[in-house]
Amino acid sequence: MTSARNAEQLYTPQILSLAVELAKVPFDPSSPLNGSARSQSCGSTVELSLYLDRHAAIDTVGLKVAACAIGQASAAIFARHATGNRSDDIERALEAIRSWLADEGEMPHWPDFHFLAAARDYPGRHGAILLPWKAAAEALSKDRDRR
């Protein structure tokens, strides 16, 4: 009964509906920037494709996600609000998320991130939450290397 209640608190209707949004952001293997990340704790993966605008800000995101509903929801939240962010924005968000997960900082200031709040109590899901930001940081580092 307790594990069913825990799952109910973690896998809310909002989390499950976010996971469905990923169909709207297909991965593009021919994009100029690609990144990937894998969670050590659960094996979840994210592959990410990016197009940047002329100011080096994210213009288009594509995702290929093999993760639990929390990882999928995290990727959907990332995709919803990634446009317009630059490399330093993604790095700051990634560090804020890491600090929050370690209970060393406030909830990150990324729109809709509050939907993931209950997952902080589940360390096995932390790696899945970080995946889209880690993959984006990797992709954007390739852009810096090209300049």
Image (tube, rainbow, N blue to C red):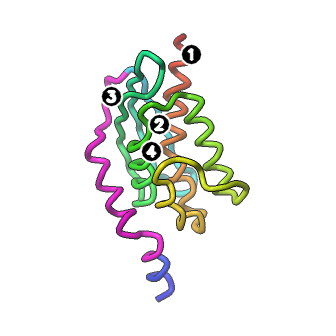
Magenta stretch: give its range. 7-31
Q: Residues within 10 Å of mark 3 (few under 14, many from 20)?
A: some
Q: Which residue is mark 3?
A: 29
User: What's the residue type where badge 2 is placed?
Assistant: Ser
User: What's the residue type where badge 1 is placed?
Assistant: Asp
User: What's the residue type where badge 4 is placed?
Assistant: Phe
Q: Which residue is mark 4?
A: 78
**Which of the image's four quarters has the C terminus?**
top right
| Mark-to-mark CA distance, 2 and 3 | 12 Å
| Mark-to-mark CA distance, 4 and 1 | 23 Å
Q: Nearer the viewer, mark 1 or mark 2?
A: 1
Q: Nearer the viewer, mark 4 or mark 3?
A: 4
User: Measured along the vertical axis of the image, is residue 9 above or below residue 76?
Assistant: below
Q: Which label was assigned to residue 71? A: none
Q: Which residue is mark 1?
A: 145
Place residue 4 in its image quadrant. bottom left
Residue 23 placed where, x, y %? 26, 47
